[in-house]
Structures are given as C-alpha cells and as structure tokens.
Amino acid sequence: MANEPLPPFSSSVRLKYVKLGYQYLVNHILTFILIPIIVGISIELARVGPDEILSLVRFLNDLDLIYVMSTLFLVIIVGTVYFMSRPRPVYLVDYACFRPKPNFRVPFSTFLEHARLVPQFDERTVRFQVKILERSGLGEETCLPPANHYIPPTCSMAAARSEAELVIFSAIDELLNKTGMRPKNIDILIVNCSLFSPTPSLSAMIVNKYKLRSNILSFNLSGMGCSAGLISLDLARDLLQAHGNSNALVVSTEIITPNYYLGKERAMLLPNCLFRMGAAAVLLSNCRRERSRAKYRLTHVVRTHKGADDAAYRCVFQEQDSEGLTGINLSKDLMAIAGDALKSNITTMGPLVLPASEQLLFLFSLIARKVFKAKWKPYIPDFRLAFEHFCIHAGGRAVIDELQKNLQLSDQHVEASRMALHRFGNTSSSSLWYELNYIESKGRMKKGDRVWMIGFGSGFKCNSAVWKCLKTIKTPVDGPWSTSIHRYPVDIPAVVKVL
Amino acid sequence: MTVSVETRRSRVTVYAKSTAPSLTPVKPGKTHEFTALDHSMSRHSVHLVCYYRQEPTVTMTALKESLCDVLSYYPAMTGRLVKNEGDGCGEWMVKCNDAGVRMVDARADTTLDEFLASATDEEERQLAYWEDVGSDPYLWSPYCIQFTDFKDGSMAVGISCTHFHADPTCVAVFARAWSETHRRALVTCPPFFHPWAFYPRKNPVPSSPHLSEKSTIPPPLHPPAMSSVTFAFSASSVRQCLADLQLSNLSPFDALASLLWLRISSYKSASLGTAQLTLAVDCRRRMSAPLPLGFYGNALHFFGVKADLSSGWIHIASELNRHVSGIKEDDVWSSVEWLHERSKEKAFQMYGPELTCLAWDNVPVYNAEFSPGAIPVHVGCRIGNAQGEGLVVIMAGAPGEGEEARTVIVTLPTDLTAQIYRDEAILKYGPKIMFSPNI
C-alpha cells in the first residue's frame, strides 16, 4: 500500500471545501433526489384543486375489493419476509476487564534485576531485553502473574491454572455484577486463550465455577493468537443468528505463566518483555429486551487469513530453540506482513463501512489506474469518515506506529491504543477491550459513534469488528482505568532510560 | 559455622524467592543519601524475627499484599546501592529505582510452640534469610523478608536488612508500620527521611577516643565461630535481680547487662580486673532536637564503659547506670563528626570485636499487630557480623510477662556459649532458655 501523503495542493482550503461538498452530495444523494420529487408533488397537489383529489379518492373506492386486498396482502407478505430475513441484531450488553492488583506490578528495574539474577540469561540476552523494554512503550504499572515474580519463575501447570482462575473469574464476576445476569441464563460460552490449553478446557473451568446449564453451547479456542478475541466474537455472532433469544458470554485472555522463555534466542525474547496479564469478559445478546440497556451493536466482522502465504504462516511461530526451550519466534518481516494483511482486510471492510463518496472516489481512481493506465497513486480511502474511534490491538509500539501511518490516523485516534499499551502492556486478545474502556472513561463515546476494532495475530490473521454505540456513556466509568484515567494521556518518550 | 557434635537436621526449609514491588511507582530520579553513622555500620546486618499465632487475616498472601502497600511509604527500601558521584557523605547512596525488596517463602516442619520450646540457635537464624552483597550491589536487595509457615498455621516473619540502611529501632518501626497498614489503621510512626540529621555542626569537634581506638584494632585473622542463646527473663526474675542489687535507682538494663558482663568475663579469664564494655544506645530521643521514632537510618551511639569487675556486681551495675544516664549530647555529636571525617574510608567493625552490649529495651517491639489484638508471641533480634568477644542484645520482653520482662540474646564464641547457658548465677533467676546452640 503506497503511503505517500496526498500532493500538497490538496491541503489548500478551497479544495477542502470542494471535497466536503462532494462528500455531502454523494452521501446524501437519495435526499437530494427525493427533495425535487417531493417539491414537484407538493406543487402539483397545490395546483390541483380539491375536486380532482376527491375524484381520485372515488376512483380508488371503485376498485374491486379483491385488488385492494391482494395489494394489501402483498405488502404485508413482502414486509414480513423482509423483517424475518434480516439478521438478528447482536447487542453488546456490557463488558468487564480484569483489574490487576498493583502488587503484581513489574517496574522496569525489577524486570531487569530478575533477568540478571536468573542464571539462564547471559549478558547479551539481558542487554537485548533492556533495549526492547526501553523502546517498548510500556509503563511502570504493567502487571505479571504471581509466578513470574519468583526467581526463577515457577511456571508450573498449577500456577498457570491459578492465574487463569484469577483473571477470568475476576472479569466474569465483575460482568455478572454489572449486568445482573444470572449464570443460568447464559446460553453460549466462548473462551479464547492462545497459549494455555489444559484439559478440561478453560470453558469447562468456567462452567464448573459458575454452575452453568448442562445444555450450554461452550467453545474453547486455543492457538489462534492475539486476534482470537474477534474470532470469538464472530463465532458468537453466528451462533446468535442460529439461536434466538440467547445470551453469549465471550471471555478473551492470555495466560502468561507457562510461556516465560528462558533461552537465548533473541527473536523469542520479545514476548517476555511485552506480554502482560489481562482478561476481558463480554456479554452479547440478541434478545430484544436487552436493546434498551445494551451499549453497542455489532454491525460487521471481517476476518482475513493470510496463512496460505508461507512467510505469513511462519511469521509468529512457536517452536523449540537449539537448546530445546519452547518460545514464540517473531520474524523480522512481521510489520510488512501485518501491513499486507491489513490491506486485505480493509479491502473487504471498505465497501461495508465507507460512505458512498469515498467508494466512488476509490472506484474512479481504480478505473483510471487500471483501465486508462493513469499514473496516479492508489487512492487510500479516508477511514476517519467511517469511524469515530479506533481500537488497534496494542501489540507493540511498532504495530501502532505502522497502522497510524497506513491509515493516516491522527495521534488522538491512536491514543487509546498507546495508553493501553503503556498502562497494561500487551494483554493480547483482551487489549481491544481495555482500549475501548479508555475511550469510554475519557467521556468520548457518544450515541451513534462507530468503533473499529482491529486485531492481528499469528497465522497471520487480521480481523476487524465494527460496533455502533447505542447510548452515550457517562463518566466516571467504573473499570480498569478508574484509578489511573486522570493521569492519562501521558507523553511516552521514544526511549526510556532504565539503568 | 561449625558445631562440635552431630547436627540435627533443620526443620526450616526455604523453597522460593521473589521480589515485592511497592504499590505506587517511585518518581524517577529520587535518591536517598546516607549519614556518617549509616556508613560506619555498613559491615553489619540486622535480623528481626516476629512469631505470630494463626489468625485468618495473617496469611502469606495477605502479608505480601500489605508489604507492597507499606513499601509505598519507604522508597529508600526499594532502591539499590550506587556509588556516590557527588560530594555527599560517604562512598555509597541509594538510587530509588523502584526495584522492590526480596521476599523468601519458607516452611517449618513443626508447630510454633514446639519450635519455641526446642529450636536451636541455627534454626532461628534460618528464619531470617540473608544474602550478603554479591559482586554487583545494583542487583542486591538491601532488605529481605522471610515468611515461614508452621504446621499449625502460625507464621514467623523475619526482616533482615543491612545495617547500612537501618538500625534495629528502624526495622522495628517498619514492622509496626507494616502491621498498621495490614490492619488498614493509621500509620503512627511514618518514616522520616532526613539524612541531614547527622550532618556535622557549624563548629565541629570531631573526637571519639573510643571509636579511634576501635578503628585501629586489626581485624582478627581467624574469627572464632560464634553461637547464640536467648534468655527470656520474666518480670519477676528481673525484679528479683533488682532486689538482689539493693540499689533503688537501677534499671532492668543495668542489672542484666552487668550480670552478663560479669559472668561472661569470669568465664573468659579466671582473674577479674578492670575491663571495658562497649555500649550501643539508641540516641533518637537523646538529642536536644529529638528525632522522631520514624527516623529512617542509624541513630546508635557507641561508647565505652570501664569498670573494675572485681569490685562486685553492684559496683558494675551502678557504673553502667552512671554512664548510660550521663551520655552528653556533645559526645554524640563529637563521635558523629569524627565518623563524618573518615566517611570515605573503609568502615570498621562496630559491634565487636571487643565485648559489646546493645541497649535496646527502651524501644517497644511487641506492637507489630497484624491482626487487632494479636501481638507477636515472641520477637528476636540478631546482629550479623558481630564476631569477636561477643555481643549481648537486651530488648523488651513479651508484654504478657510483665513490664520489666526482658529478652537477652547473647552471642559468644561457641565454647563460651556452652558454658554461659549453664551458668548458675544466671539460672538462679529462672530465665527461660530458648534457641540454644545445637549441643
């Protein structure tokens, strides 16, 4: 995707107003066509006297009853078919994020001290981790699970299970409290956790803890990377189309405990430095009565999988290093592959969400380049017209920078992602929900706003979800940002000196 | 530390080490400077162990959480040692880099009562895990907190730290602040960071004959193996001591310190003559501008007391009383100024190598109540690296035993310890003997 900025003449004021005028014209074309028609009819009605109207009414009365009834029934049947074939709306009733206790905090100095004290890391490895941490965009309040605070980390299965219980149960408890939903009323349960997949699954753990119904539809998605949260949403949406009047609980998390890499391979050390503890629980519903208290409605989900390409498939790869230690290998062309996946995703997303004005411009530009072989740069549609808020997966500073450049977003658009990365670190699939909560906590979410959630993950996948806000969210918001929102946004320097 | 006979296997097992951060991040760039007194104590370490009965709120997890909470008030504790680049006092200072304090988890294979009745000196030492500074002081936590679970759910909390940072009073006040934070009560003695408290006066008179003499003593080539024994004197035993002394103005400290001095010296050499005892006294309250109890750092004044041991116990006790009550503030300032002059030089051993006594019974130590009303069953305090002729620590006893009750921890060369805890003159007063060496 060519990312050069548009030529300088486009920033002149006159062209800006031309562009605005064009947008209003094309996006409201129906209104513009209807107005002359209405005016015409009104003038006609005004011209025609009351006698002509009466004669028209008498004419209608003389029609056979059968014609009238058939027309009426036809209208009713068409209307019914139309309403029944519409997809069921999927409402987001509420969501809750895990709030890590500050005693699990990992300041940079503690992280590096542990890296030095653990015998498996040599000097080169420690220096690399220092460099990563300094440029990571993380803050001093990110949290790691209890097992990672030990020297050396005690990564047992029991510790992983207890971390899972801690994060998942806190998020679900908070969600059930906020919504007043009784566990027996949950019909669908979907859990996604990429790197920890015990038997019985985490979804079985939740069914056991909350005594969910025996005919619950439970799913556990593992190994699907950081974009699995949106995959779970897509699955929930499809299930809610098949089952009416249902509630779905979607839990997104990543369990850090079993995945601390104790080897020397540099490409595998990044997750140690960036991944942090987090979880989110989301309640979706297609019940009509939830419409009044639901916060958002899910309008689109677009999933793009680039796994057919070998380079994309091997981009984020869990494997054993030369010493037999398992870690996640991040390849050097991660950013390029991410950009490519994003391009595919927005090519599909564009026609669904962009206003007609942008689509027409894109079409003209495409025709000009392909058919008339004009030497124009490919037109990048302005997604800021389609969305008010952006939640970009806080995978790392580089990911956010790349997306900001590709989509030409302002600093305020990516502020939620940067601040969530600073405060909570890379919490994998749940990071989108922390970012959404940031936007709400800042009081920026108004009724009618559209939110674009973009997730990237191993595979290589790029998934998007589009939400429409159904009611203005009032501050203060009770959530993971309650204790720290007043300190944000902060200015994050490019390099934080640790030592 | 060698023991002459077969050692019983210790019942204390350390199984995990971790780090506790403070709850609130420390502002970057914060530092803490040491005083001359702090630098002088850098060769020693303090170990305080408090024992608690089982309480529902006193669990390892809950204590770790409240530890993180109280550390927010003590940024100096979570910092690391760095070289003092400026012209401040001494070679080292603390960079408050928010690295946290070390925590150690342990378990003891016995119940609390059984342990208090039968544990050896070595086992009590293992309740306060300590690692000396290794090759890189920047990675070394100056504090180490050990949590030991007993079989019956009781808990022992061991706080070890370098004497560089804090003296025993400071550690006891920290324990109290921690317990108050745990109970969600008001912290009565918040820490007071004021390294300028012991800056030399405008017209300094640096002079300390006692310390000058100590600094010239060469360190012993083969320091003897040391072991300790604890005597817990109840109020009635102390009152009996005082009654035997027949002088009305003596304090429990005078009686017990003189008794031990006499008995230890009599075992060291058959003939008694004039001898010198080094006393260490907390001087927070003795300054004309008294330092608050929460003053973070060292405030111990070391001075020598000479007495003729052959003149009898009563004479020794009254000499001690005279010297302790007669400490002049000028003497304290003079020795601080003398230490300040030589602060850039290598520190020498302060507790020892001659016989030393720490007068610590005026500081309340049984007030670290993690659960309301649940005071520690027992509190012990040790000083690390006090090799030589020995160290006697006299501290307050359990409140249940009475106001005059005292706990005396005697650290001596191993063969002397074996004799002292069988000494008739001391056993006459019926102290409870705890944590004797493994013999």
Image: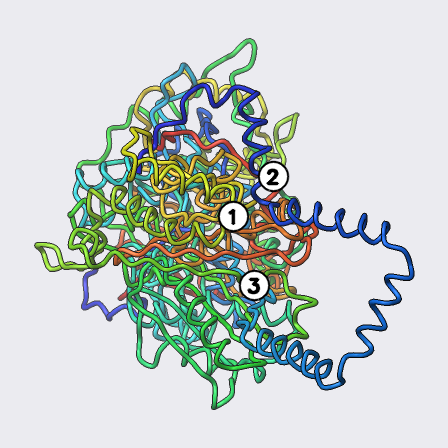
Q: Is residue A391 left or right of residue A39?
A: left
Q: Secondary structure at mark 2?
A: helix
Q: Amino acid at mark 3?
A: Tyr
Residue B376 falls left or right of residue A2? right
Residue depicted at 62% across the width and 45% down the height: A28
Front residue of A187 and B284: A187
| Discs 3 and 1 carry the same chain letter | no
| x and y, in percent, of residue B379 in the image | 49, 58
- Mark 1 vs mark 2: tell me if same chain: no
Which of the two labelled residues, at mark 2 and mark 3, occupies the earlier sequence position?
2
Disc sitting over residue A434 in the figure? none
Q: Residues within 10 Å of mark 2 (few under 14, many from 20)?
A: some
Which residue corresponds to mark 3?
A95
User: What is the number of the mark on residue A24?
Assistant: 2
Image position of A387 (left or right of A196): right
Give residue B23's mark.
1
Is residue B205 visible from the viewing direction of this image? yes
Disc 3 is attached to a residue of which chain? A
Alpha-carbon distance for marks 2 and 3?
36 Å
Q: Chain of mark 2?
A: A
In terms of depth relative to the viewer, which is nearer, A397 or B98? A397
Residues at marks 2 and 3 on the same chain? yes
**Which quadrant holds the N terminus of chain A?**
top left
Identified at 34% across, 19% down, the residue is B344
- Quadrant of the snapshot with the C terminus of chain A: top left
- Asked which quadrant contains residue A253, the reply is bottom left
Q: Is residue A68 above or below residue A352?
A: below
Viewer-nearest residue: A256 or B186:
A256
**Residue A235 in picture, x, y percent from top left:** 42, 71
- Amino acid type, mark 1: Leu
